[in-house]
Image (cartoon, rainbow, N blue to C red):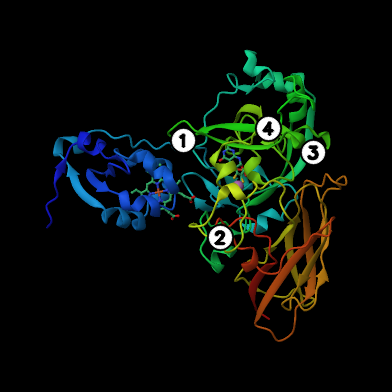
Amino acid sequence: DHVFPQYTRADVKQHASLADRVWVTYAGEVFDITEFVELHPGGNRILLAAGGALEPFWALYGVHKSEHVFEILQEYKVGELVAEEQLEDVDTTDPYSHDPSRHPVYKVNSLKPFNAEPPPEILTDSYVTPNDFFFKRNHLPVPEINPDQYELVIETPNGTKGGKPLQLSLSDLKTRFPRHEITATLQCAGNRRSEMNAVKTVKGLDWSHAAISTARWAGVRLRDVLEHAGYSENTPNANHVQFEGLDCDLTGTSYGASISFEHAMRKDNEVLLAYEMNGNELPRDHGFPLRVIVPGVVGARNVKWLGRIVVSAEESRSHWQQNDYKGFNPSVDWDTVDFSTSPAIQDLPIQSAITDPHPGQKVTPDFEGKLTVKGYAWSGGGREVVRVDVSLDGGKTWKVAELSGDKQKAGQAWAWKLWQLSVPMPHNCKDLTIICKAVDSSYNVQPDTVAPIWNLRGVLNNSWHRVQVTVDA
Ligand code: HEM
Ligand code: MTE
Ligand code: MO
């Protein structure tokens, strides 16, 4: 066996940058990962561990607890910690130990942080998704917030001239501003990423088609709060509204995003600071005690555990606003991508998917020889879904599905339509491909295949949804 040199933690600390080479420790062993830094799928933040222990970072990003990652690490082993320092405490406390418990029905795409979607057929069992089955998308541990001590901080227009930021408690919000309620669908930009992954590997969680859900949200209008803080259409340099979450990483950086000031101020956009979800206080996973709901806009801007609002000339500097949640040309790869060249995703495009039957399911016609197909359809920007087409013959012929859902005002159709269709089962077929596609009130349609809209981050997949089943006649 190879005998490795012995190092102290102080030795390792000498190697804390690319210039001094990057060393890290894990479970008593020492690694020189300099060559791996630019290969790291999680990007540059790997340098945060430079000169120290990996344990606390890997406790935060549970994606590393895999055989594959340990194999990579072993390639870079250069030494061992001296015996007495091997036993020295490194912080291995699990930052997720205070996360709430969740229903076992979920398909879990990542446990730490928790990212999960319900079985798709649950989505079409009720117009409004029960809180326990609503998709959950967290980038970090769920913060523990005492509602009695909670304060929302809002920087005021004269903040830079010595004015104090405004602070509002939960009861201030509930009593000083009119309550407003909306029904809105929330969709993650990564919904249906797995179909993009099947074309060519993308970076990101492998979401199937249930990273979308609908709830009745109640709270106060963001514009009312901004006006109370002293903002108006005439406030100079008020171009963007930034939201900061109270969830943060090991450097104290919190989740953040922004929308345009104009979008926030327009009454018809109904941007909410929500404290209720489906008649209950917000569940911890969904932002307790307060979150932003920007109806019609990508999930990522709907900041949970809202701690601070900043009105600014520029967009949020957050990683998730600047270097993620953007679309690109299919030929752009990780060597050529320049995130500054694409706008941050806001309004989402027209979308639909089949929730029942499942891919690979064995289907049996009913007593009339018919098959029932169900799904959801939704569009961003308040555009209403006006039609859903379904084909059982690869797109040669189409039938129109029956739509159901709340009646919504023109331009404020924030929630999805559920749809359903009963069709005679085609004769003599063993395999069947069911396809759906939707049309919104601007006559936007879905692209037929995923390859031409493929992008390296696997976002914005709204191609025709295809489900292959086998027929049990
Ligand atoms: C993702 C390896 C250190 C943060 C990954 C993945 C691998 C990897 C293989 C992809 C996992 C997958 O998708 O299945 C390593 C190795 C490390 C290291 C070998 C040390 C030598 C770190 C550190 C941090 C970090 C120190 C944080 C400070 C992340 C994040 C992702 C990731 C956030 C997810 C990226 C995404 O999906 O967008 N890492 N990692 N990693 N890593 Fe690391
Ligand atoms: N807000 C905070 N503070 N932290 C987060 O990780 N995730 C965002 C958004 N708001 C996130 C957040 C993303 S990418 C999505 S899709 C939605 O929350 C998911 O909301 P949900 O978990 O209530 O479904
Ligand atoms: Mo998302």
Query: Which of the two labelled residues, at mark 2 and mark 4, occupies the earlier sequence position?
Result: 4
Q: Secondary structure at mark 2?
A: loop
Query: Which of the two labelled residues, at mark 2 and mark 3, occupies the earlier sequence position?
Result: 3
Q: Amino acid at mark 4?
A: Val
Q: CA distance from mark 2 to mark 4?
A: 30 Å
Instruction: Write the residue at 59% across / 22% down.
Output: 150
Q: CA distance from mark 1 to mark 2?
A: 29 Å
Q: Which mark is residue 332?
A: 2
Is 94 situated above or below 361?
A: above
Which tag is nearer the camera, tag 2 or tag 3? 2
Whole-percent x and y of residue 366? 75, 73
Q: CA distance from mark 4 to mark 1?
A: 22 Å
Query: Which of the two labelled residues, at mark 4 and mark 1, occupies the earlier sequence position?
Result: 4
Q: Secondary structure at mark 4?
A: strand
Query: Which of the two labelled residues, at mark 1 and mark 2, occupies the earlier sequence position?
Result: 1
Q: Amino acid at mark 1?
A: Asp
Determine which quarter of the picture holds residue 181: top right
Residue 166 visible? The answer is: no
Q: Residues within 10 Å of mark 1 (few under 14, many from 20)?
A: some
Determine which quarter of the picture holds residue 52: top left
Whole-percent x and y of residue 443? 83, 60
Q: Amino acid at mark 2?
A: Val
Ligand 1 contact, mark 2 (Cβ < 8 Å): no
Q: Amino acid at mark 3?
A: Asn
Q: Residue furthest bottom?
A: 428
Ligand 1 contact, mark 1 (Cβ < 8 Å): yes
Q: Nearer the viewer, residue 136 or 154?
A: 154
The residue labelled by disc 1 is 249
Mark 3 and 4 residues: CB-CB less than 8 Å, in contact? no
Q: Nearer the viewer, residue 211 or 74?
A: 74
Is 384 situated above or below 177?
A: below
